[in-house]
Amino acid sequence: MLADFRSLIDIAIVSFIIYRILVLLVGTRAVQLVKGVFILAVLAFGASFLRLRLLQWFIGNALLALSFAIPIVFQPELRKMLEELGKGQFYLFKRKMSSDEAEMRVHQITGALNYLKAHKIGALLVFQQEVGLGDYYKTAIHLNAKITQELLISIFWKDNPLHDGAVILDKYNLIAGGCYLPLIDAPEISRWYGTRHRAALGISDVSDAMVFIVSEERGDVSLAFKGKLSKNLKEFQVEKLLMHYFVGEQIVTGWEKFTRSMMRLFWVRPTENKAGGILE
């Protein structure tokens, strides 16, 4: 009986460690290597079952070489995991943000957007969701600051060195400023769109990020999501989208988040929720 209980604890600890490692990898370029290793493992099983000796030898040597490459490729993710452990943040469940807390953040962000729009100051705000954006802010200026109206306005002020790049935020912090994003390369995109709009479409096309753009030419606010652009948003639409971001269905925790992460990892697309009809 005692041995069975110890086995359960052993399995639970190992499962938790594997879960946290996979969650950290989802949304980074390193996840492509995980997919490759998974395919090699499936091929190795098939080769062993069919007794294909040459294929077994080839895959065995490939996996041996990868065993040396994986720690190097996964170095940023491993460092992040150890940092979370050191900070006491190696947790399974996250608290859901309260409505009051969300409204406070929405008020700060919409206040900044309204000011930037009124003064025709160009801005690019990227709201990170389940797909991590570490590859895009690891070389930028790390801020890890509280989200405030004054900070957002000052970042995009014309004399600020960070004003040309994007800011990346999550639900609790302004992560980094001066971030450079991939430009979308699609012939159907109008040539009238500037670099800021193309960057917003680019990052939204390769992630599930929600991106707000303030045009310095027209003084309006647009939204880029899933590679599509919604132009000239009204203030109430921005508020609704932000409330959905902070307290909506995108906030998932525990094993539900793990399941959705694994579905994304192995190419299965979960059903996406839409907010206010704007993202359709």
Image (cartoon, rainbow, N blue to C red):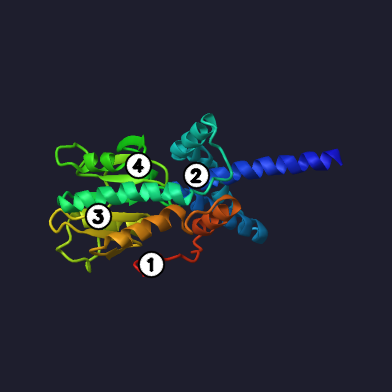
Rounded to the nearest whole Å, what is the CA distance between mark 4 and mark 1?
Answer: 24 Å
In the image, residue 161 above or below residue 240: above
Point out residue 120 in the picture as x, y percentages from the top left corner. 15, 52
Dot 2 amino acid type: Leu
Which of disc 2 and disc 1 is earlier in sequence? 2
Seen at 61% across and 58% down, the residue is 47
Looking at the image, is mark 2 or mark 4 earlier in the sequence?
Answer: 2
Residue at left offset 33%, top offset 45%: 168
Report the residue at 56% width, 37% height from top. 90
Q: Which residue is mark 2?
A: 24
- Estimate the spatial distance between the alpha carbons at disc 2 and disc 3, rounded to whole Å: 28 Å
Badge 1 density bin: few <14, some 14–19, many ≥20, Cα 10 Å: few
**Residue 175: image x %, image y %?**
36, 40
Amino acid carrying mark 3 in the image: Ile
Q: Depth check: 247 or 215 in front? A: 247
Instruction: Confirm whether residue 27 shows in the render.
Output: no
Distance between the alpha carbons at the discs numbered 4 and 3: 17 Å
Q: Is 5 in front, or is 169?
A: 169
Q: Earlier in the sequence, mark 4 or mark 1?
A: 4
Dot 2 and dot 4 residues touching (CB under 8 Å): no
